[in-house]
Image (tube, rainbow, N blue to C red):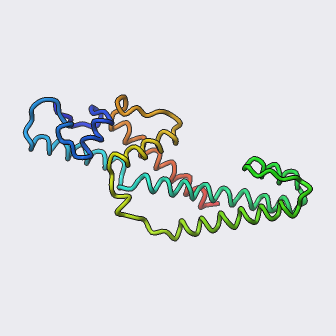
C-alpha cells in the first residue's frame, strides 16, 4: 500500500514522510519514482490546507499580541476606574491579573497600572518592530511539528495523538487554529 491521500496516513507517519523518510510513504516495494510522486502529493496537499510555512511562529506572535492588547485595554479600564475613585473595583481587576494591592494604597495602584501599561506597550512595540526570522520559521522539522502540535493541543484543549489522527485532520485543525487567531486579531484591531 502506498499513501497518496492525507486522510489515509497517520500524522506520525506523515511527519516521517515530510521530514524526508520516503520509505514511510508506503508498505511494500515501490519504485523511487512512485514514492517521490506520493511524497510530493502528500506534502503539496498538506501545504495547500495549512497555507504558508512558519505557521507556528506566526500564531505564537499573534497570540502574544492579542494578550498584550487585552492587557492594555484592561489597564486603561483600571486607569479609568482609579480616576473615578473606584479603588476596590480596580484592585479586584488587578487581583484577577495576579497583582494583589490594598484599595487604600492609591499611589501603589496607580504606579502598578502605569507600570503594566508601559511594559505592555513596550513589548507590543518590540514585537511589531521585529522582522520575521524566515530561515528559522521556514524549517519544518520534527521539532517544529512537536511545537506546532503542542500549540494545537493547547488551543483546542485536547490531546492530539499522532497515531490516531490522520494528517488531513491535523492539517485542518492547524488551519482552523490559524483562522481563529486571525479572526481574534482582526476583531481586536477594530476596537
Left or right, 137 with respect to 183, comes to left
The image quarter in which residue 174 lies: top left
Residue 65 in the image: state x and y as whole percent: 57, 59
Which residue is located at x 60 percent, y 65 percent?
123
Q: Can you say which quadrant of the picture contains the N terminus?
A: top left
Left or right, 88 with respect to 144, comes to right
Which residue is located at x 73 percent, y 49 percent?
98
Reply above or below: 121 against 153.
Answer: below
- Report the front residue among 129 and 147: 147
Reply above or below: 61 against 47.
Answer: below
The image quarter in which residue 13 lies: top left
Left or right, 105 with respect to 18, comes to right
- Report the front residue among 15 and 33: 15
Residue 99 in the image: state x and y as whole percent: 76, 52
Residue 145 in the image: state x and y as whole percent: 37, 45
- Report the front residue among 86 and 112: 112
Left or right, 27 with respect to 114, comes to left
Which residue is located at x 26 percent, y 40 percent?
16
Q: How many numbered marks have been drawn onto this rendered protein structure?
A: 0
In the image, farthest residue toward the left: 31
Residue 157 in the image: state x and y as whole percent: 53, 36
Amino acid at each position: 500500500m502506498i499513501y497518496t491521500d492525507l486522510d489515509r496516513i497517520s500524522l506520525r507517519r506523515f511527519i516521517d514522510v515530510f521530514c524526508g523518510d520516503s520509505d514511510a510513504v508506503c508498505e511494500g516495494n515501490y519504485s523511487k519514482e512512485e514514492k517521490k510522486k506520493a511524497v510530493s502529493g502528500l506534502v503539496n496537499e498538506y501545504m495547500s490546507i495549512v497555507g504558508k510555512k512558519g505557521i507556528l511562529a506566526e500564531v505564537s506572535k499573534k497570540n502574544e499580541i492579542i494578550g498584550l492588547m487585552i492587557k492594555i485595554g484592561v489597564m486603561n479600564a483600571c486607569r479609568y476606574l482609579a480616576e473615578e475613585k473606584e479603588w476596590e473595583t480596580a484592585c479586584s481587576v488587578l487581583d484577577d491579573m495576579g497583582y494583589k494591592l490594598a484599595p487604600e494604597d492609591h499611589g501603589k495602584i496607580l504606579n502598578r497600572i502605569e507600570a503594566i501599561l508601559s511594559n505592555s506597550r513596550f513589548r507590543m512595540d518590540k514585537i511589531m518592530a521585529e522582522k520575521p526570522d524566515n530561515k528559522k520559521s521556514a524549517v519544518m522539522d520534527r521539532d517544529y511539528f512537536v511545537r506546532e502540535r503542542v500549540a494545537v493541543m493547547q488551543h483546542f484543549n485536547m490531546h492530539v495523538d499522532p497515531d490516531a489522527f490522520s494528517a488531513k485532520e491535523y492539517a485542518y485543525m492547524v488551519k482552523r487554529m490559524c483562522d481563529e487567531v486571525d479572526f481574534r486579531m482582526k476583531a481586536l484591531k477594530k476596537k
